[in-house]
Amino acid sequence: MRPANAEIREGTRFAFGKNWSRFLSVLDEERICEAERSLAQMVGAPGLKGGNFLDVGCGSGLFSLAARRLGARVHSFDYDPQSVACACELRRRFLFDDAAWKIEEGSVLVPDYLKSLGTFDIVYSWGVLHHTGAMWKALGNVVPLVAEGGRLLIAIYNDQGRASRIWLRIKRCYNALPRGMKIFVLWPCLIRLWGPTTLKDFLRLKPFYTWRNYRGLRGMSPWRDVVDWVGGYPFEVAKPEEIFDFFRVHGFTLTKLKTCGGGLGCNEFGFVKPKDMERSF
């Protein structure tokens, strides 16, 4: 595979890691505790303590940190070297020299690399696999990483039909533009994404209330989330039933589902891999 940095320079990939590195400046204990709560809720019983947790596309490393603080042994990897650096910085800040949290550069699209990892009680990939450029291949590649009886937790962008195709064109345009020109795409998108909510806050006599109290899907600031959304390319989408059918064919059982109501955002899935499944690549 070609290096992520080469794709970023060519404008065919968003600099996810660069965006995450800026997020670290606003990361605080409150956001970490929120990440812990949301992860614990998604995992459910019997929890994470004593299990092994794989974070596929770890981004900032926030949820890897949450999993480690909840008692799991954690292995994190990301295709973007700046994301890897972010996760390493989080480990340095909060769990210095922790041997139970391994972080490295790697790709979910490289089977030989994945084979070296083994299997995990929990495989977590939140808002990641739709950014690989080969989403269905990536979804298939995570199947063997889940141990028998283990769980797979993923979030995938919802297919909105025509609206998703428009966003795809916007994302391509944004990444192809020179740095100084990107703001001319960001500002109209900010108005489109936040305008209705901001207007509602004013009408409720609570100006900018939602913006000030925003935490986002993965604990980002609102501006960082806008940049991540507009820039997030490659970009693929799927209907909830397509994801369900895909993993049903692979023998998985759906245990949790939270949709975005047919709108903008991710559908969230929890699957369990039966204990009698054969493991193969």
Image (cartoon, rainbow, N blue to C red):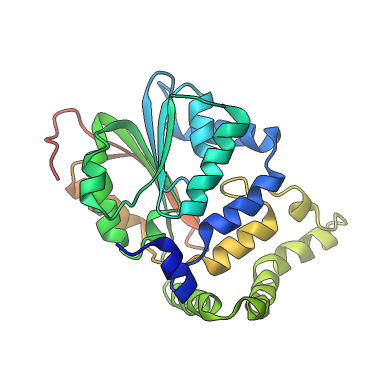
| Left or right of 180 in this view: 92 | left
Q: Outermost residue, right direction?
A: 205
Along the viewing direction, whichever of 226 and 269 lies nearer the viewer: 226
Q: Can residue 61 be seen at all in this image of the molecule?
A: no
| Left or right of 19 in this view: 126 | left
Coordinates of residue 246 in the picture (x, y in percent) = 24, 53
Taking the spot 21% from the left edge, 50% from the top edge, the residue there is 111
Coordinates of residue 161 in the picture (x, y in percent) = 41, 73
Q: Residue 151's image quarter?
A: top left
| Left or right of 68 in this view: 93 | right
Reply above or below: 20 against 62.
Answer: below
Q: Quadrant of the N terminus?
A: bottom left
Taking the spot 40% from the left edge, 54% from the top edge, the residue there is 79
Taking the spot 38% from the left edge, 31% from the top edge, the residue there is 53
Taking the spot 48% from the left edge, 72% from the top edge, the residue there is 9
Q: Residue 274's image quarter?
A: top left
Reply above or below: 205 against 85.
Answer: below
| Left or right of 206 in this view: 46 | left
Coordinates of residue 145 in the picture (x, y in percent) = 26, 39
Coordinates of residue 85 in the picture (x, y in percent) = 52, 46
